[in-house]
Amino acid sequence: MSTLLAFEEALEAIKQSANVRVGQQIIPLASSVGRILATDVVASICVPPNANSAMDGYALATADWQAGKQFSISQRIAAGHAPQPLMPGTCARIFTGANIPAGADTVIMQENAQIMGEKVAFNEQPRQGENIRPKGQDMQTGQTVVQAGETLSAMHIGLLSSLGITDITVYKQLRVGILTTGDELIAPGETLQAGQIYNSNGPMLSALVTQAGYLVSHCIHAADTPKDTEDALQILLESCDVILSSGGVSVGEEDHVKSVLEKRGTVHLWKIAIKPGKPLVHATLQGTPFLGLPVTQAPRWSPIIGSHAFYCLFALVRKYNCHNLT
């Protein structure tokens, strides 16, 4: 257990031994950014649902075109309005996003049209399908558009909204409990006494968890006693999917976290080949994954320790995202 592991080996060990399971819930799509999709989303409609114009211009049949021919404008089609079938030998004034009328197979942009009173002529021969967005160009009915396990972004919200979706099934957010230890630590805002420093790792780890898109269910500070440490861990075990701790994992007489873990759980690894931060512990405590980080009093090292916590948590959560959701 005392053999130093390379940081990459430690990450892999965490992924292999961690086992986190969370439930599912249905939430409004508008509130789902940053959440993890629980089921594949399959398109129930085509997007766009009908062929439509990519330009403001004129819709006609390519077979009707002749150089210099003057076309009557048989209808005007704006976006959001259903067109009538195109009368043979005529054209339709059409606007961007409007549905292509039956009988038309091309759109000539208005810049290439010559207005002649009530009629219009086109000198350039059109190509079939020109300036037309075909039905289902973006998504086809039955197509899987977002897969389970993906973290929903603003782009996903737009994509799913285009399918008319209002609610989405996601995994419940991972609940992370944070434990800090040390008699020398007090909460920011309190008055420092001799030998005390402010607790910076608790707020930092809470912020990292929130930044990663997970919930901080509790952030508890325990005094340097076995009982206080065990009591704090029991509270976290009752409300968290993962526990992240700072301090109490080294070999000093006042380091009690590791001894409690050995008493009540299984320690998978201890000590990794990084400095600062060597005494990192990964354990399972009553079925709950536990990541124990060393504490540091030097402010310049706190971000580094926090980064180690983040990467280890990410390794655990990446497995949670892909393999262990129920």
Image: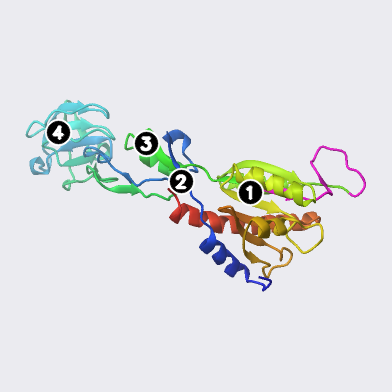
Q: Amino acid at mark 2?
A: Ile
Of the numbered discs 4 and 3, the one sitting upstream in the chain is 4
Residue at the far left: name it.
Answer: 88
Q: Report, in whole angstroms, how far the alpha carbon at label 1 lies from the one at label 2.
A: 18 Å
Q: Report, in whole angstroms, how far the alpha carbon at label 1 lies from the one at label 3.
A: 30 Å
Secondary structure character of the magenta stretch overall: loop
Of the numbered discs 3 and 2, the one sitting upstream in the chain is 2
Left or right: 86, with 280 as reference point: left
Q: Quadrant of residue 296?
A: bottom right
Region of the chain picked out in magenta, as a range: 177-195
Q: Amino acid at mark 4?
A: Cys
Q: Which mark is residue 55?
A: none
Nearer the viewer's eye, disc 4 or disc 1? 1
Q: Which residue is mark 2?
A: 36
Q: Is residue 99 above or below residue 298?
A: above
Q: Position of residue 252 (x, y in %)?
A: 80, 62
Q: Report, in whole angstroms, how far the alpha carbon at label 3 lies from the one at label 2.
A: 17 Å
Q: Position of residue 124 (x, y in %)?
A: 18, 45
Q: Quadrant of residue 160?
A: top left
